[in-house]
Image (cartoon, rainbow, N blue to C red):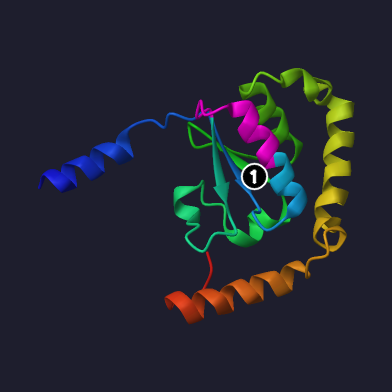
C-alpha cells in the first residue's frame, strides 16, 4: 500500500524542471546542441533532456509526442504539459538557461515566421545531411527492433 501511495504522489507532484527537451540521440548535430545545453544547465535540472531514440521512450510520459512526430520536428514539453515545437523550443530552452537573447529576435512575427520556415527546411533535410536513412526507414527499423527485443510490435 505504501508503494502505491508513493507512486501516486510522485505522479501528482510538479516536475522540478522548467522544460523537457525531446531530442534525437542518434543525430550527431542534435547531440552537439544537447551537450552544449547540458553544460549550460550545469546540473541545475532546469531542462529535462529526453532521448526519443532510446527504446524506453514513452510518448505518454512526454506530452504524447510519438516517435515519428518527434523525429520530424523538435518538440519540448513545458512543466504544465504544454507541447511546443520548432524554433519555439530553442527560444524556450535558451530562455530557461539564461541565454534568451540568442533567440529573442525570433519573437518578432516576421523574423519568427522566417526562422520557422528555415528550421522546417533544416528538419526536412537533417537526416540526409547527417548521413542517416530516410525517416520511413528509421521508423521501420525501430519498429522491427522493438518488436524483436521487447515484443512491442507497434511504436508509439
Q: Which residues are magenta?
A: 34-46
Nearest to the observer: residue 130 or residue 9? 130
The furthest residue to the left: 1
Please tell me whether residue 25 is drawn above or below residue 105 in the rendered image: below
On the rendered structure, is 104 left or right of 26?
A: right
Magenta span dominant secondary structure: helix
SS assignment at label 1: strand
On the rendered structure, is 10 left or right of 93?
A: left
Where is residue 56 drawn, in percent x and y?
47, 60
Where is residue 58 drawn, in percent x and y?
47, 57
The quadrant holding residue 9 is top left
On the rendered structure, is 32 left or right of 13?
A: right
Q: Which residue is mark 1?
A: 75
Where is residue 138 drawn, in percent x and y?
69, 70
The quadrant holding residue 49 is top right
Residue 39 in the magenta stretch? The answer is: yes
Nearest to the observer: residue 28 or residue 109? 28
Q: Is residue 28 visible?
A: yes
Please tell me whether residue 140 is drawn above or below residue 119 in the rendered image: below
Where is residue 11 drawn, in percent x and y?
32, 41
Amino acid at each position: 500500500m505504501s508503494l502505491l501511495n508513493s507512486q501516486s504522489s510522485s505522479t501528482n507532484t510538479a516536475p522540478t524542471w522548467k522544460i523537457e527537451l525531446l531530442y534525437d540521440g542518434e543525430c550527431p548535430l542534435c547531440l552537439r546542441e544537447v551537450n552544449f545545453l547540458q553544460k549550460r544547465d550545469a546540473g541545475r535540472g532546469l531542462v529535462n533532456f529526453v532521448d526519443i531514440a532510446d527504446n524506453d521512450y514513452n510518448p505518454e510520459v512526454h506530452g504524447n509526442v510519438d516517435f515519428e512526430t518527434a523525429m520530424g520536428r523538435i518538440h519540448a514539453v513545458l512543466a504544465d504539459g504544454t507541447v511546443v515545437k520548432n524554433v519555439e523550443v530553442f527560444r524556450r530552452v535558451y530562455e530557461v538557461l539564461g541565454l534568451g537573447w540568442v533567440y529573442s529576435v525570433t519573437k518578432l512575427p516576421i523574423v519568427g515566421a522566417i526562422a520557422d520556415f528555415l528550421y522546417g527546411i533544416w528538419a526536412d533535410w537533417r537526416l540526409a545531411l547527417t548521413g542517416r536513412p530516410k525517416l520511413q526507414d528509421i521508423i521501420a527499423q525501430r519498429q522491427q527492433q522493438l518488436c524483436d527485443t521487447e515484443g512491442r510490435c507497434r511504436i508509439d
